[in-house]
Image: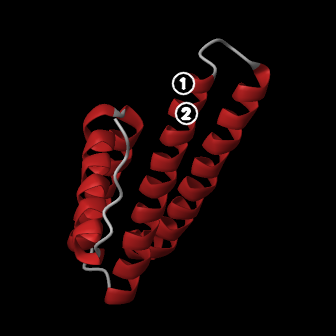
Amino acid sequence: MEFERDRTYVTGRLKSFKFALLGAWKLLSTEHSIMTQFGIGVLMAGAGFAFDISAQEWLFQVFAIGLVMSVEGLNTAVEKLCDFVHPQFEPKIGFIKDIAAGAVCFAAFTAIIIGAIIYVPKIF
C-alpha cells in the first residue's frame, strides 16, 4: 500500500487535524502518564475557578498544563519509537529515553513554579 498525499489544502488540513485528534485520544486513553497529567490539569482548572484567578493567571496556568502534556506526549512518542527500534535493553537507547523524560521533568518543574506563584499568595 503506497501513501497517497492529499494535494488540496483544505482537505489535507482537515485530515491532519483528524489525525492529531486521534493521536490525542490515543494518548489520553492508553498512556497512564498522560492520564495523570490530564487529571492534574483538571484539578488545577478547578482550583482556578475556586480561587477566582485572573485572566493573566489563567493564561499562565493553561500554558503550563499544555506544556507539560505536550512534552509528555513527545516523551511517550520517543519511548515508543525507541522500544520499536530496539526492543532489548540497550544503554544508548536508555540514555535517549532518560533525556526525553528529563524534558518532561523540566516542564513539570516549570508548571509547579507557575502554580506556586499563582496559588501560594491566595492560600496564605
Q: Which of 22 and 5 is in front in this view?
A: 5
**Callout 1, which amino acid?**
Phe
Q: Mark 2 points at which residue?
A: 81
Q: In which quarter of the image is residue 83?
A: top right
Residue situated furthest right in the rendering:
92
Specify the label residue 115 is tagged with: none
Q: Do the residues labelled 1 and 2 touch (CB within 8 Å)?
A: yes
Residue situated furthest top in the rendering:
88
In this rendering, does residue 47 appear at all? no
Seen in the image, is 20 located left or right of residue 75?
Answer: left
Q: Mark 1 points at which residue?
A: 84
Seen in the image, is 110 located left or right of residue 28?
Answer: right
Q: Nearer the viewer, residue 106 or 51?
A: 106
Seen in the image, is 26 located left or right of residue 112?
Answer: left
User: Dot 2 surroundings within 10 Å: few (below 14), some, or many (20 or more)?
Assistant: few
Residue at horizontal 75 percent and vertical 32 percent from the top: 95
Residue situated furthest bottom in the rendering:
55
Residue at horizontal 59 percent and vertical 16 percent from the top: 87
User: What kind of colouring is applied to the model shown?
Assistant: secondary structure
**Callout 2, which amino acid?**
Leu
Q: Quadrant of residue 100?
A: top right
Image quarter of the C terminus = bottom left
User: Dot 1 surroundings within 10 Å: few (below 14), some, or many (20 or more)?
Assistant: few
Q: Which of 8 and 72 is in front in this view?
A: 8
Residue 50 percent coordinates (x, y): 21, 70
User: What secondary structure is marked by label 1?
Assistant: helix
Does 104 appear above or below 83?
Answer: below
Q: Nearer the viewer, residue 88 or 73?
A: 88
Residue 14 percent coordinates (x, y): 23, 67
